[in-house]
Amino acid sequence: MLFLSKKQDWLGNIRGDVLAGLVVALALIPEAIAFSIIAGVDPKVGLYASFCIAVITAFIGGRPGMISAATGAMALLMVTLVKDHGLHYLLAATLLTGVLQIIAGYLKLGGLMSFVSRSVVTGFVNALAILIFMAQLPELTHVTWHVYAMTAAGLAIIYLFPYIPVIGKSLPSPLVCIVALTAIAIYLHLDIRTVGDMGALPDMLPVFLWPEVSLTLETLQIIFPYSAGLAVVGLLESLMTATIVDDLTDTTSDKNRECKGQGLANIGAGLLGGMAGCAMIGQSVINIKSGGRGRLSTLIAGSFLLIMVVFLDAWISRIPMAALVAVMIMVSIGTFSWRSLINLKHHPLSTNIVMIATVIVVVWTHNLAFGVFVGVLLASLFFANKISHFMYVESKLDEDNSTRTYRVFGQIFFNSADKFSAAFDFKEAVEKVVIDLHRAHFWDITSVTALDKVVIKFRREGADVEIIGMNEATTTLIDRFGTHDKPEEIEKIMGGH
């Protein structure tokens, strides 16, 4: 069964994976160069990283068909480190980033994705779509009409080519777009920006490069804050992208294995002179839309990238940026969840607020971690508020008016504790109070404290209090943290100590 699964991952879609990998490799080149420039390092640092990370995650990543490489989100976190300490400290930070991500995998932190709500994922996707589109705007400003014409022609090819009989379905339209526009630009001698204008392509294969830094506590103090930030953002973007690819392909993936795979890939990148990277939602969408599904597509993307920039640089450097801009605009359009705009009318207000807040924070800060953190925080607060409304208390007085029974329903925690306390009438003259918890559950210390206060107040009024119906988890929590049945604690409270 395992062998068949591995065979399907690698050989189940050979033609689609090879063609999709080629498209992704072409699209990766200008992005890797651009991200290197953002980080303040030589273009080959981003290109080597993209090759290494893609190849390693193809073998050991947890999500077949997902593309990992150098990314803008990671590059932004490196700027200060490179500026203040140089390339070798960046390589050391990349190695430490990988170690931290491997540790996260073994601690099974990939399971934390279960705490990210669908509205946060939708906001994350929409924000990335907007950022991908915004990243293309510099290529479309202060340019000649030829660039606009080429970009429009590229989009026409991408969207119309699939409708051509026979060949329309056999070749990925983004690849046809890149090849066709490159041929037109060369034939017409168009004076427009090309991949070669982005920066010099490397002319040699990567070599082993151990960071020339002293292995001291001082070095660790310098690189650890950057490595921790890179590890968190890298895993966050990778796990979110894995979730999105899961949805696009209607398959599942191993998130903890992905954490380990990303870690090993970053260690490999650091040892070959590359910068830290993570999964790329844009390139992953290109891969899926172009027919890529298996691990072979990721391997082809990384391998072709290196082969093309080292051995075919004369041709690759002549690809017009307009062709790649058209591909990335297609990605941004395809990535954006247009249905989420329609759902604004039907979804609850809290869900819409979470989604919109995630979009705004990510786009405003260009930091995916901040946006997801805000989204998860808001979703948690809204959820806690909603659950607290389902807590209520019923009461009934017995026939001889001596015993009042309070039946508690719902979840008692920090947000519903005050409502729980307010449901009791402490001034009523009864001999006995029964608190029935058969249909209630206590979750935290705040709820236990609220129960203690209720019991102690009734006892101060002279009533005998009996608590019944606690489930096992509630009993354990109250036995451990409750004080109403511990004489020494009661004495402190009653005595005012």
Image (cartoon, rainbow, N blue to C red):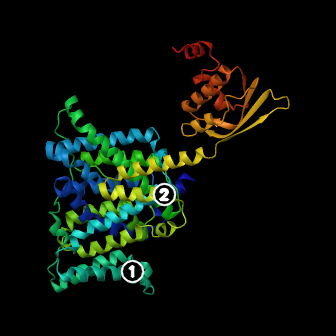
Report the front residue among 108 and 409: 409
Whole-percent x, y for residue 68 in the image: 35, 56
Judged from the image, the secondary structure of the residue bearing numbered disc 1 is helix
Q: Residue at x 25, y 60 (%)?
A: 32
Q: Nearer the viewer, mark 2 or mark 1?
A: 2
Q: Position of residue 400 (x, y in %)?
A: 85, 28
Residue at the image position 45 percent from the left and 64 percent from the top:
293
Q: Amino acid at mark 2?
A: Ser
Please give the count of numbered marks on the rendered protein: 2
In the image, residue 171 sits, relative to residue 232, either above or below, namely below
Q: Is residue 233 left or right of residue 443?
A: left
Q: Is residue 78 visible?
A: yes
Q: Is residue 64 visible?
A: no
Q: Residue under label 1, please give it.
A: 159
Secondary structure under tag 2 reads helix
Distance between mark 2 and mark 1 Cα atoms: 29 Å
- Determine the residue located farthest toward the right in the rendered image: 399
- Picture residue at 37% right of the left edge, 61% below the top: 127
Taking depth in this image into account, of 35 and 207 the one nearest to the observer is 35
Image spot of residue 441 (x, y percent): 65, 36
Q: Which mark is residue 119?
A: 2
**Image-quadrant location for residue 402:** top right
Callout 1: few (<14), some (14-19), or many (20+) C-alpha neighbours within 10 Å?
few
Q: Would you say 123 lies left or right of 132 here? A: right
Instruction: Please state which amino acid type lies under the numbered disc 1.
Output: Tyr
Q: Residue 426: which numbered mark, if any? A: none
User: Quarter of the image holding residue 172?
Assistant: bottom left
Give the mark nearest the N terminus, 2 or 1.
Answer: 2
Q: Position of residue 187 (x, y in %)?
A: 19, 85
Between 381 and 271, the one lying in front of the other is 381
